Image: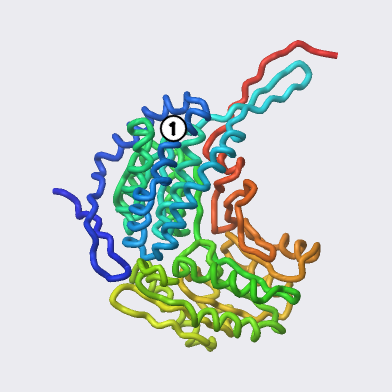
Amino acid sequence: MSSTPLIPINPATGAPLAPIERTPLASIPAIVDRSRTAQRQWAAQSIEQRISALEGFAARLDDAESADRLASEITAEMGKTLREARGEVRNVRIRLEDFAARARVAVEEEVGREKGVEVRTRWRPFGVVAVIAPWNYPVATPSNLILSALLTGNGVVLKPSEQTPRTGAILHEHLASSLPAGLVGLVQGAGAEGGALVAGDVQMIAMTGSIATGKVIMRSAAQDLKRLVLELGGKDSMIILPGADLEAAARHAMALGLANAGQACISVERIMVHATLVERFLEIVAEMVAAVRVGDPRDEATKMGPMASERQRSIVLEQLADAKAKGARVLIDGAARSPGFFLEPTLITDLKPEMMLVQEETFGPVIAVEACDSAEQAIVRTNASSYGLGASIWGEPGPALDELAGRLEVGMIGVNRGLSTAAGGPWIGWKSSGFGYSRSVAGMRQFMQPQSLARTIAKTD
């Protein structure tokens, strides 16, 4: 008896899309085995050969028709604007060259000599990496992990989100078209299929998703001590102090608060503004929020599309209702619209520590502003969170602001700007926001294990 297929829903209309068959559980071991067989030869190739092979993937992303097909499917399955979806695909292509450059350094042997002994540290791939993808950035996020795994000599089995399986299938098609047969496998499904893949004969799991799912994966991985890279939730703070450029800060709050309808792990979810600046900041942001056009994500004039699902919209509405009941002041009350899962942006302030909106990840189009009396108070509030993905701090440029930034207990910090992985920086979350990290040379080495080789050499004076 066949299992029920996956039926993704178009968030802009609420209508079902063409179904995707789940991968039978019994077939998953064979998919992993094929990847492992191909991986042995793949690992034997030089880094330059692996980069060359991935040029076929790059060519698919350079081809306007192929790239637009992928972007259109993102929009259809998860609702982000076509403009944002095209940017997501384009960014994968741009990052590929940087990933290749970091991988060249990451795979280099290190040599040390001491008292007649030479030790070579070599970097070896794990084998097969299971990549568990999220629904909010169904191309960019798994591509970061897949490229890291492939460039360092591993095989990959991709499991897309059950909300975006059609996008995942096209991404897999683009990758597999220029690579050895079986090297990149595909498993379609939900929890059962993902669980079977994680429990299978993979040597590493790279996943982006919720903290709850991350804990489930960690428990499963512990049985065989499988290696992990987990990017989990976020509750990123933005701290605005005297001396800050309020217009620039407001633009950032909008860009990172409403991008992808607020459904980003690095979305700005708590904006802490010094009490002397808060009313002016609210005036600036209110004008910007009021100008946001919410509508058909395929329309070039649309600035924000629907939320990805009714479930996610319900979470946001529940948090807003809780905040209102506990005394929050709503300056712009975003309305929910149907058909589809539309939710207009909300601007809210006068928040309290006990509110769900303060404590829990929101993942929606909410600009939440808190007044703070000092930088110290804002830092204490930020560090009290169990999340630790990113934060930004805005104020008078200089050593004092840099010192304050260094006291934030998060993996990534922007000073008078947003977060960035430019210049080879890692993508890393502290506390409950992550386990391991990716990008950068050090991130590439998360996908390999060191092996030392010692030998005696002639002593020299």
Q: How many marks?
A: 1
| Residue with the most extreme top position | 458
In this rendered view, identify the residue nearer to me: 353 or 107: 107
- Position of the C terminus, as image quadrant, is top right
Residue indicated by mark 1? 53
| Residue with the most extreme front position | 64
Q: Amino acid at mark 1?
A: Ala
Res. 157 image quadrant: top left
Q: Is residue 147 left or right of residue 177?
A: right
At numbered mark 1, what does the secondary structure look like: helix, strand or loop?
helix
Q: Position of residue 51 (x, y in %)?
A: 49, 33
Q: Is residue 446 left or right of residue 113?
A: left
- In the rendered view, would you say 456 is above or below 192? above
Can residue 64 be seen by looking at this rendering?
Answer: yes
Q: Residue at x 64, y 65 (%)?
A: 392
In this rendered view, identify the residue nearer to me: 416 or 313: 416
Q: Residue at x 49, y 76 (%)?
A: 366
Q: Residue at x 46, y 46 (%)?
A: 206
Q: Position of residue 128 (x, y in %)?
A: 42, 36
- In the rendered view, would you say 78 is above or below 181? below
- In the rendered view, would you say 285 is above or below 176? below
Q: Position of residue 5 (x, y in %)?
A: 21, 54
